[in-house]
Amino acid sequence: MQLPDELKVAINKNAFCAMATHLNTNEIQNHLMWIDYLGENLIINTEKGRQKTFNIRSDNNISLVIFEPDAMYSSWEIRGEVQEVIDDSSANTHIDKLSNRYTGHPYNRAHDISWKDAHIKDREMWKIKINKLISMVRPQAKSDPE
């Protein structure tokens, strides 16, 4: 499924997403996450060994709501599946890219500190195939009287 251009723009402007994974058959776990895309896939980057990493290996279905940073009443609901888990060093490089975009500096450290010297846990990326995308893009509510 093709990503809408306005969704790509929102992601590039540091949109956040609410992500839901299955904790077990009766419970869903939610997280607020940074989001990225590669081609027509969404990318989540997370620390290895977290509960959500076990969740996604048990059930690869995932649900995301991505919020437009400049108009919080506009969002996209995505239902999909994690097609691939990438757990090599490229995931560490990717979180630095995201951190620089979201915060202006490398992940959890200053520019002059290396990943190894900062003792940061390794990361993994999830490549998400979109099965259903519901656009809830709305005009921004007017705040000025007419």
Image (spheres, rainbow, N blue to C red):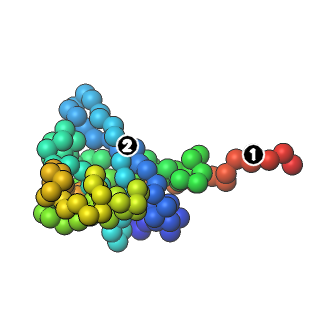
Q: Considering depth in this image, is 128 or 95 the residue closer to the camera?
A: 95
Task: Check disc 1 and report its element: helix, strand or loop.
Answer: loop
Residue 37: image quadrant is: bottom left
Q: Could you tell me which residue is drawn at 46 percent across and 54 percent down?
A: 15
Within 10 Å of the Cα at label 2, are there few (<14), some (14-19), or many (20+) other Cα atoms?
few
In the picture as drawn, the residue positioned furthest to the bottom comes out as 39
Q: Return the x and y of residue 53 as percentages of the image width and height.
A: 18, 45
**Does residue 59 appear to the left or right of 11 in the view shown?**
left
Residue that badge 2 annotates? 32
**Does residue 95 appear to the left or right of 8 in the view shown?**
left
Q: Amino acid at mark 2?
A: Leu
**Does residue 102 appear to the left or right of 26 in the view shown?**
right
Q: Return the x and y of residue 47 as percentages of the image width and height.
A: 20, 49
Tell me the quadrant of the picture where the N terminus can be found. Answer: bottom left
Q: Could you tell me which residue is drawn at 34 percent across and 40 percent down?
A: 31
| Mark sitting earlier along the chain (1/2) | 2
Q: Amino acid at mark 1?
A: Ser
Instruction: Say if 24 sits above or below 135 in the image.
Output: above
In the picture as drawn, the residue positioned furthest to the front comes out as 112
Residue 127 seen anywhere in this rendered image of the structure: no
Residue that badge 1 annotates? 143
Query: Mark 1 and mark 2: span between their CA atoms?
Result: 27 Å
Q: Considering depth in this image, is 40 or 52 the residue closer to the camera?
A: 52
Within 10 Å of the Cα at label 1, are there few (<14), some (14-19), or many (20+) other Cα atoms?
few
